Image (cartoon, helix red, strand yellow):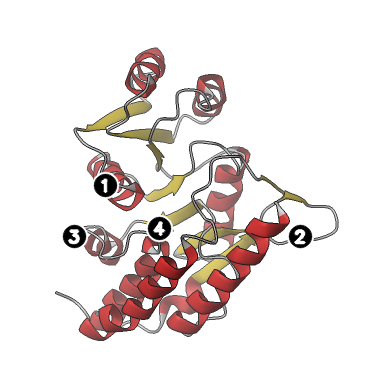
Amino acid sequence: MGIVRKTAVVVPCFNEARRFDPQAFLGVARAHERLHFVFVDDGSTDDTPRVLTEVCAQLPDRLTCVRLPTNSGKAEAVRQGMARAFELGAELAGYWDADLATPLEHIEKFAAELARRDASMVIGSRVKLLGHRIERRPARHYIGRVFATMAALSLRLPVYDTQCGAKLFKVDPALRRVFARPFELRWCFDVEILARLRTEYAADGHRDPAGEWVEYPLDRWTDVPGTKLTLRTLPGILLELARLSRITRGGRR
């Protein structure tokens, strides 16, 4: 099948030296000449800078490292990486978790789905279905479902899984504007992206883009230890979702 359009995938990294799999990224990059990875080191304090520098040196034309001087959080790391993806002239751009809970083979599937459905966004969805291997701890699943339900209500969209760390977008002026300014939400920036996109398309006089957004049921997803989503963080996350309506009402700025 292959990846037809120039595609850049941002990989935010904070203290990922032990979990990072250089050969996985190198193998996929070598298999798809139109695919570019942008690794963003978010002020790591372990060996991550060296690991990323070494892997990028092996394929410098398709692997790029961006170094943030201090830890700024995943939202800002993704935003900075997307800015670099735009500079690279990507036609499709998105982001992927460094722990590869979602296998890299799905990038090609997402790109094909964007073309097949003439969609503007494809996001991974961790739905347990027959024939799919979704390995998720029960506690994380139930916390995630509470969050997902609240997110769907905040957005007024029937979205099942806003927080899966695998997303791919068609690059257009609205997407560029979405990532042009820092996000207000820390835990819920994925939801803020959807809210901003909707606002930007409406401001341009387009129809609601939700009809061009696709959730893709993942074939495989593995719950990798190290998640920060716990019962302790849930109240703060729900407070952020409450702020989302204010952000949405504020529109473009």
Q: Amino acid at mark 4?
A: Lys
Q: Is 157 situated above or below 51?
A: below
Q: Is 16 situated above or below 179?
A: above
Nearer-N-terminus badge (2/1) = 1
Q: Is 31 situated above or below 168?
A: above
Q: Which mark is residue 170?
A: 4
The structure residue drawn at horizontal position 31% and vertical position 77%, both measured from the top left corner, is: 201
Q: CA distance from mark 1 to mark 3?
A: 14 Å
Q: State left or right for residue 112 relative to residue 168.
A: right
Crowding near the residue tagged with mark 3, few <14, some 14–19, many ≥20 C-alpha atoms within 10 Å:
few
The residue identified by callout 2 is 128
Q: Is 100 situated above or below 138?
A: above
Nearer-N-terminus badge (2/3) = 2
The residue identified by callout 1 is 86
Depth-wise, is mark 2 or mark 1 nearer the camera? 2
Nearer-N-terminus badge (1/3) = 1
Q: Nearer the viewer, residue 153 or 54?
A: 153
The structure residue drawn at horizontal position 52% and vertical position 55%, both measured from the top left corner, is: 229
Q: Secondary structure at mark 2?
A: loop
Residue 217 coordinates in the image, percent (x, y): 67, 59
Residue 181 coordinates in the image, percent (x, y): 18, 60
Nearer-N-terminus badge (4/2) = 2
Q: CA distance from mark 2 to mark 1?
A: 34 Å
Q: Is residue 235 visible?
A: yes
Crowding near the residue tagged with mark 2, few <14, some 14–19, many ≥20 C-alpha atoms within 10 Å:
some
